[in-house]
């Protein structure tokens, strides 16, 4: 089994961001010369203090753009990037990844906010972020969590989607993609996954994804940007399904 590795050790040179493991961290010069920093915020949650610091970084007339993945994108001149990174760190904020790792985890408001919710979404997004932030992967890996079948996060449009069920359980989809030239819906793998098994299940999926990308590297092509659905096409769905059942077996 491929052992997952993590690497959040990146360096801003003053011109670009470097990371030995190849993770593309979201500090990128835009077409107009301004640098965009995407701030990691699982479920789009920020504290008041953190929002105040984001406002300080961009300045009175600066711009913060929210992304589709519920993260805040700071648009600042290049010379402000080094200081901005220190300011983010001081309030517990981390830079999001763009490629070769987990993208900012999207989640609807869920339990405690939405009257329709069947379970927790934001707490789970936070836990998944703690467990898998900076994990080195073949390419982007998007996770979305919805609190009920109204599905405001569109869980089937993520590499991995979770939907809360009653009594602390979750349904799981894998292999979706919301963007790119061939967007597709993921496939329902399993219902009734207990909350405490979500992280072990996601870990196993990431391991098989990384292993499959290695195993089929020649077929996927040199420098392939292999998303989970590409790997699924090679390994078949059953490999994932069986591995998930193995993780869940002791709970049965
Ligand atoms: S998916 Fe359900 S719980 Fe989440 S915001 Fe939408 S309606 Fe509310």
Image (cartoon, rainbow, N blue to C red):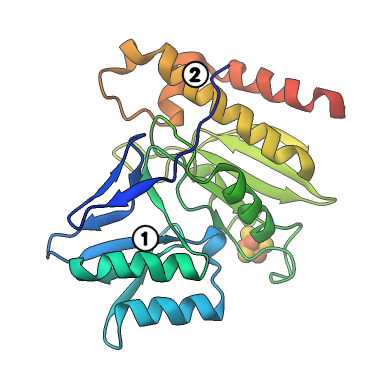
Does residue 182 appear anywhere in the picture?
A: yes
- For residue 187, the mark is none
Question: Residue 71 vs residue 199: left or right?
Answer: left
The residue closer to the viewer here, 181 or 30, is 30
Question: Residue 117 vs residue 13: left or right?
Answer: right
Q: What residue is shown with label 1?
A: 38
Mark 1 lies on a secondary structure that is strand
Tag 1: Cα neighbours inside 10 Å, few (<14), some, or many (≥20)? Answer: many
- Residue 204 is drawn in which quadrant? top right
Q: What residue is shown with label 2?
A: 211
Tag 2: Cα neighbours inside 10 Å, few (<14), some, or many (≥20)? Answer: many
Q: Quadrant of ligand 1?
A: bottom right
**Which residue appears at 13% of the width and 60% of the height?**
31
Question: Residue 8 vs residue 194: left or right?
Answer: left
Percent coordinates x, y for residue 118 in the rendering: 76, 57
The residue closer to the viewer here, 187 or 251, is 251
Mark 2 lies on a secondary structure that is helix
**Which residue appears at 39% of the width and 49% of the height?**
97
From this view, report whether residue 221 is shown above or below residue 34: above
**Which residue appears at 56% of the width and 47% of the height?**
155
Query: What residue occupies the far bottom of the structure in this picture?
Result: 60
Percent coordinates x, y for residue 236 in the rendering: 52, 16
């Amino acid at each position: 089994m491929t052992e997952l590795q993590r690497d959040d050790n990146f360096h801003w040179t003053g011109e670009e961001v470097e990371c030995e493991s190849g993770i593309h961290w979201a500090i990128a010069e835009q077409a107009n010369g301004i640098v965009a920093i995407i701030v990691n915020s699982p479920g789009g949650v920020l504290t008041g203090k953190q929002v105040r610091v984001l406002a300080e970084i961009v300045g009175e007339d600066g711009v913060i753009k929210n992304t589709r993945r519920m993260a805040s994108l700071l648009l600042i001149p290049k010379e402000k990037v080094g200081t901005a990174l220190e300011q983010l760190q001081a309030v517990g904020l981390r830079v999001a990844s763009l490629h070769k790792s987990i993208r900012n985890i999207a989640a609807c408001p869920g339990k405690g906010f939405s009257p329709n919710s069947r379970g927790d979404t934001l707490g789970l997004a936070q836990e998944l972020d703690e467990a898998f932030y900076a994990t080195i992967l073949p390419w982007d890996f998007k996770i979305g969590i919805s609190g009920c079948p109204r599905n405001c996060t569109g869980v089937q449009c993520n590499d991995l989607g979770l939907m809360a069920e009653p009594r602390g359980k979750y349904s799981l989809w894998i292999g979706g993609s919301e963007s790119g030239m061939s967007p597709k819906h993921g496939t329902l793998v399993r219902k009734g996954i207990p909350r405490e098994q979500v992280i072990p299940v996601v870990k196993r999926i990431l391991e098989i994804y990384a292993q499959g990308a290695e195993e089929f590297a020649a077929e996927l092509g040199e420098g392939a940007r292999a998303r989970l659905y590409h790997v699924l096409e090679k390994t078949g769905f059953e490999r994932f399904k069986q591995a998930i059942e193995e993780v869940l077996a002791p709970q049965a």
